Image: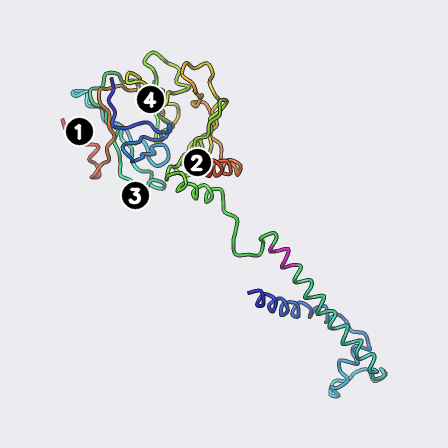
Amino acid sequence: MMKKEFLVGQSNELVKADKVFDLHNLYDFVGMVLEGGKRRLRIVFEPNPEHGKGNLPVSVNFEAVDYLEFSPNFGSRIVCGLEDMGYKSPGDRDDEWLLDEQQSTPDDHLFFRLEGGDFIRVHCQHADIVEATEVGLLWVPDC
Amino acid sequence: MELNRFLLSIIIAVFLAQPVMAEPLTKKELAFAFKDTPEIPYDAGVEPLSGQENRETKGAIWSYVAAGIAWVWRGVQVLRRTGAGTTARTKSLREQAADLIPRNANRHRVRLRSPSQQMDIDLAGRAHAGIPTPHTRVSPGNLRAPNQPAYNIRKSPVRPATQQDIRNVRRYLERLRR
């Protein structure tokens, strides 16, 4: 069961309360922080210098991760854009299509497709998206 | 406003009529033009114009002016019909797309769906696959997927948005507002 503080809107955005984070159009994918000791994953996005002015960096945080998968050779080439987001059933390996929020269940994996075909597939107990209030805050693990 | 436009048209017409009137004059017109300016020699062989000829010549000049006014007026009408010559210019696709974002609750993507395909139009934002916004991705429906509707998005190429895409988005957003 994954409890989320956000919804996947259209496949380009996460929606938390009334705030829409258009990660596809307004943000650049920066990277991630994996804290193995706490089974915690943070995926970090920064506002695009041209199109995301006025936005703060955001981190999609996953606590108590129980499934994590990266595409082969993930991280071996430059990736700075998110293509789309959605869900996949645990046993479904066909990522040609994704489930949307209404079609998903709490057991489904959250799927981030990045530029160039790379992906991050994750499931956890609790997921949230937070805005950084200070530059660099997202990059400092607290363990 | 209409009066100002009319007066402006007359001024322009008179101005534009000058080249027409400046065409080489006949000997008779030349004589008429300079008959009261003795310091400028004119063809002494030309007989002075009679009153009838004088009236005819003046009439010819005024007919040029009238033709000029009509010509300018027709031109103004054509410009008004075509929209050319005005300060307003046609907006680029990028500007048209950006104008639609407030109507889309400040969201940058509009998704149009039919059973056979899904069209994602990004009105503004970062480029993808080297294609700047506005751009469009059309994904075919996947009827074999267990959850419907489903669309194959992974291999669907991104292309620049067309004027028709923007038009479709505008119509869609207008329908939503009703």
- Judged by depth in the image, the label closer to the viewer, 2 or 4, is 2
Using the rendered image, report if marks 2 and 4 lie on a common chain: no
Alpha carbon distance from label 3 to label 1: 25 Å
User: Looking at numbered disc 2 in the image, what kind of residue is underneath it?
Assistant: Leu
Residue located at (43% from left, 35% from top): B122
Q: Which of the labelled discs sits on residue A111, or is there none?
A: 4
- Judged by depth in the image, the label closer to the viewer, 3 or 1, is 3
Q: Which residues are magenta?
A: B75-80
Q: Based on the picture, tell me whether residue B24 belongs to the magenta stretch.
A: no
Q: Specify the farthest residue to the front.
A: B178
Q: Residues within 10 Å of mark 4 (few under 14, many from 20)?
A: many
User: Would you name the residue on which mark 1 appears?
Assistant: A141
User: Would you name the residue on which mark 2 appears?
Assistant: B176
Residue located at (65% from left, 62% from top): B73
Mark 2 — on which chain does it sit? B
Q: Residues within 10 Å of mark 2 (few under 14, many from 20)?
A: few
Among the two numbered marks 3 and 4 on one chain, the one whose residue lies closer to the N terminus: 3
The quadrant holding residue B121 is top left
Among the two numbered marks 3 and 1 on one chain, the one whose residue lies closer to the N terminus: 3
The quadrant holding residue B34 is bottom right
- Residue B50's spot in the image, x, y percent? 84, 83
- Residue B32's spot in the image, x, y percent? 78, 81
The quadrant holding residue A8 is top left
Q: Which of the labelled discs sits on residue A54, or is there none?
A: 3
